[in-house]
């Protein structure tokens, strides 16, 4: 078990170094960059990976290989980089993915930080990307089509156009089911909408069978008894409370659909909901996570760029477990 974890960490480190190395290489090939230095080779782990001169100013670049970030992880990165915000140099966060519209809006408040996401890197290094040595990175960037409309774009538009409130609950439920089907089928079964248990006491909005025999969904089934993925869609215009968590907890049964559930919502939960989420897990081993519009947007962006969208689910669970 320890060997597997070490191998996983080593693979992540290698992939991160490849992105850093390739980005530095593209900068050296670009006429607008000069004095490009991989900072980790000079000062070790200072939070800055690459230093260079760019159009008359010095840029300090931190590279992250992750294509997405949860809000808590993004806050950790901001905290780490904030030591440089009083510097006259330009601070850049570079990564081969996209931020959600909400995250972009939050980061605009930090005018000392510049974001190089997959779109920005594609614009700056359009010519250099074709000469990348890493075929994996090259394929990732070549899939990025800035001005084309995809199925992911259409689904995100539908989500954004759906008004909050109980009046539109059916439209939101259908949109959630369509997004989940696009993201996770055929690894998961097609969404089944609104099933009741035998005594009709508990109704589940969306159910997706998990018969996956490899990858992360197999791990979820084995570790968290996610035999079926239960999704309760809440199109509330107000914050969901502990009752919503208790409702989905009642659906989850070890001898029934399993012990893993998702609450899809439009606003942040109340603190009572988070508290009940923790209690349900610690007392009954029922794992419930919250997925909002920002999370759906990130998963759709990952799917669009050929990356497994379940990375968002994975981060959600990791953040929850590590926060206990």
Image: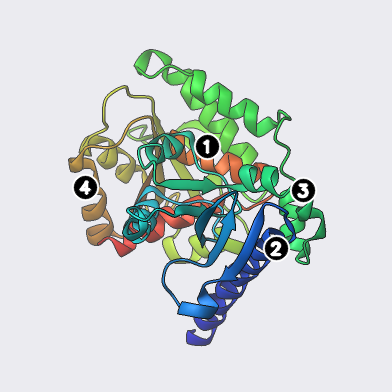
Q: Earlier in the sequence, mark 1 or mark 4?
A: 4
Residue 142 is labelled as: 3
Discs 2, 3 touching: Cβ within 8 Å: no
- Packing grade of label 3 (10 A; few <14, some 14-19, many >=20) is few
Q: Give the SS element for disc 4.
A: helix
The residue pinned by badge 2 equals 28
Residue at image x 42%, y 61%?
224
Horizontal arrangement in the rendering, residue 76 relative to residue 186 (left or right) = left
The correct choice, above or below, for 48 with respect to 113 in the image is: below
Q: Position of residue 152 (x, y in %)?
A: 64, 33
Say which quadrant the C terminus sits in: bottom left
Q: Give the SS element for disc 3.
A: helix
Horizontal arrangement in the rendering, residue 260 relative to residue 24 (left or right) = left
Of tags 1 and 4, which is closer to the observer? 1
Residue 276 is labelled as: 4
Q: Position of residue 288 (x, y in %)?
A: 35, 49
Q: Earlier in the sequence, mark 4 or mark 3?
A: 3
**Mark 4 → mark 3, Cα distance in angstroms:** 44 Å
Q: Going by the picture, which residue comes out furthest to the bottom?
A: 3
**Mark 2 → mark 4, Cα distance in angstroms:** 52 Å
Q: Earlier in the sequence, mark 1 or mark 2?
A: 2
Residue 254 appears in the figure? no
Residue 297 is labelled as: 1
**Mark 1 → mark 2, Cα distance in angstroms:** 34 Å
Q: Earlier in the sequence, mark 2 or mark 4?
A: 2
Q: Give the SS element for disc 1.
A: helix
């Amino acid at each position: 078990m320890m060997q597997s974890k070490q191998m996983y960490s080593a693979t992540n480190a290698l992939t991160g170094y490849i992105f850093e190395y390739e980005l530095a290489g593209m900068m050296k090939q670009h006429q607008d960059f000069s004095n490009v230095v991989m900072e980790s080779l000079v000062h070790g782990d200072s939070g800055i990976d690459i230093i260079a001169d760019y159009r008359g100013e010095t840029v300090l670049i931190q590279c992250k290989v992750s294509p997405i970030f949860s809000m808590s992880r993004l806050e950790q990165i901001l905290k780490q980089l904030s030591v440089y915000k009083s510097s006259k140099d330009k601070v850049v966060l570079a990564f081969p993915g996209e931020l959600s519209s909400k995250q972009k809006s939050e980061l605009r408040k930090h005018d000392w930080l510049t974001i190089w996401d997959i779109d920005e890197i594609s614009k700056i290094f359009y010519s250099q990307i074709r000469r990348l040595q890493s075929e994996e990175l090259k394929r990732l960037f070549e899939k990025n089509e800035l001005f084309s409309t995809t199925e992911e774009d259409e689904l995100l538009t539908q989500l954004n156009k759906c008004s909050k409130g109980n009046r539109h609950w059916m439209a939101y439920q259908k949109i959630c089911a369509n997004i989940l089907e696009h993201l996770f089928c055929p690894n998961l079964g097609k969404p089944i909408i609104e099933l009741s248990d035998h005594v009709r006491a508990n109704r589940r909005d969306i159910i997706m069978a998990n018969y996956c025999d490899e990858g992360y969904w197999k791990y979820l089934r084995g570790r968290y008894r996610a035999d079926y993925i239960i999704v309760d869609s809440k199109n509330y215009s107000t914050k969901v409370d502990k009752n919503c968590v208790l409702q989905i907890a009642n659906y989850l049964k070890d001898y029934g659909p399993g012990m893993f559930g998702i609450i899809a919502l439009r606003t942040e939960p109340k603190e009572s909901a988070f508290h009940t989420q923790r209690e349900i897990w610690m007392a009954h081993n029922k794992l419930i996570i919250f997925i909002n519009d920002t999370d759906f947007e990130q998963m759709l962006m990952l799917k669009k760029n050929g990356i497994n969208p379940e990375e968002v689910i994975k981060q959600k669970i990791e953040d929850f477990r590590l926060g206990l």
